[in-house]
Image (spheres, rainbow, N blue to C red):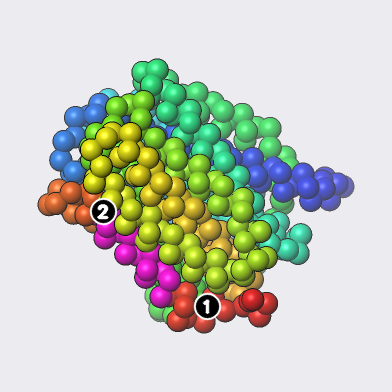
Amino acid sequence: MNTQALISKEKIRYAALTFFLAQGLCFSSWASRIPDIKDIFEVNYAFYWGLVLFLIPVGKFVAIPLAGYLISKLGSRIMVQISILGYGLSLFAIGAASHIVLLGIFLFCFGVFWNLCDISLNTQAIGIERMYGRTIMATFHGGWSLAACLGALIGFVMIVTNVSPFYHFSVIALIIASIVFISRPYLQEDTPAPKEEIKEAEPKRTFRMPEKLLLQLGLVGLFALIIESAMFDWSGIYFESVIQAPKSLQIGFLVFMVMMTVGRFLTNYAYRIFGKKRVLLIAGSFIFIGFLTSSLIGEVFHSMLAKVIVNSLGFMMVGLGISCMVPTIYSFVGAKSKTPVGIALTILSSISFIGSLVAPLLIGAITQAFSIRYAYLVVGLLGLCIVCMVSFTNAFNTENEK
C-alpha cells in the first residue's frame, strides 16, 4: 500500500511549511551575526568583506546546474532533506571556523546548500499549490519570514547577552535536524521525472533560448536579490558603522525582518484587493522610498534615538516592499510557465541569482569608495527599475487583474 496516499494534503502542506521555517531560522541566524563575525576576523575594509560575502552567492551559483538535474532525478522530497541538513551543518561550521580561509570555504558551502534548498523546497511548494488549486505560495514564504524574524530576535538576544556565534549556531543546527527528523515522513512524494525532463536538465552543447516569461521574471528577480542582499548582509553593519548605534539599539535587521514577515502574511490579501501586478508596483515604490529615507534623511538628526527611529522606518518600508517579490515571481512561474517546474525554477535562479553575485561586490566597492549610505541610495533606485519592468512587460499581466 502507498502510505503517501493516506497522508492528507493538510499534513503535507504543514510538513513543507516546517522546512520553510527551518530554512528561515538558519538564514537569519547567520545574517544576525554578520557584524560579530566580521569583528571576530578583524576585517576592516568594506570591499574585502564584500569579497568574503561574495563566496556565498558563488556557492549558490555553482549549485544552479546541479539543482534542476538532481530534483528531476531524485525528486524534491529527497533533495529538500539533503539540502536543509547541509544548510544547518554549514551554519555550524561557520560558527566553528578559526581562520578566514576556513570561513570562506564554509560560506561557499552555505551558499551551495542554500540554493539547493531554495529550489527543491519551492518545487515542493508549487506542487502543493497545484494540489490545492489556489495561491498559497505566499503563506510558505510567510512562514520562512516568520522563522527568520524569530531568528533575528534570537540573534539580537544572543548579541546583547554576549553569546558567541559558535554556541548560537550549534543550537540552531540541532533545531534544524530535529525538524527534519519529525517532518520528513509527511513531505509530498514526487516520482523521478521522465527521461526527457532529466535530459532537459542536463548540460547541452547547443544553446536553447529560455522561455521569454522566465527571462522577464528573472530580471525582476535579479533586482530583488540585490535589494535582499543589501539588507540581509549589510543592514547590521549599516546600524553599526553609519548610525554608530550601541548594541542595544542595533535593530535594523530585526525591524526589516519583522516587516518582511508582516508583508508576506498580507500578500495573499493584497492580491485579492489589488491584483498581483499592482502589488508589485506598490512594493517597488516602497523599496525606493525606504532606501531614500535611510540614506538621505537618516543622518539629518543629531539625536541617536531619532536616527534609529528614522532609519528603522526606512528599513521597515524596504522590508514591506521586498516581502512579496520572490513569492509573487514564483507564483507567476507556477501559473504561467510552460516549462517543467524544477527546470523553470533553475532557469529563473540562473538569471536572478546574478543579483546575489553582483550585490556584495557592488555594495562593498561603493562603501569603500564613498559610504554605505551611497551604496544604499544606488540599491534603492532598483525599486524604480522594478516598477518600470512590471509596468512595461507582459509577464505580469493576468486575466483577472483588477
Q: Nearer the viewer, mark 1 or mark 2?
A: 2
Query: Residue 33's x, y, as percent?
Result: 36, 32
| Left or right of 242 in this view: 334 | right
Image: magenta residue range? 375-388
Q: Which quadrant would residue 402 be assigned to in this image? A: bottom right
Of the numbered discs in the image, which one, if any, rests on residue 395? 1
Task: Mark 1: give few (<14), some (14-19) or many (20+) Cα within 10 Å.
Answer: many
Query: Residue 373's x, y, as percent?
Result: 23, 50
Three-letter amino acid code of the residue under disc 2: Leu
Residue located 49% across and 69% down the image: 281
SS at badge 2: helix
Residue located 62% across and 35% down the image: 180
Residue located 29% across and 46% down the image: 298
Closest to the observer, 155 or 13: 155
Closest to the observer, 12 or 209: 12
Of the numbered discs in the image, which one, if any, rests on residue 296? 2
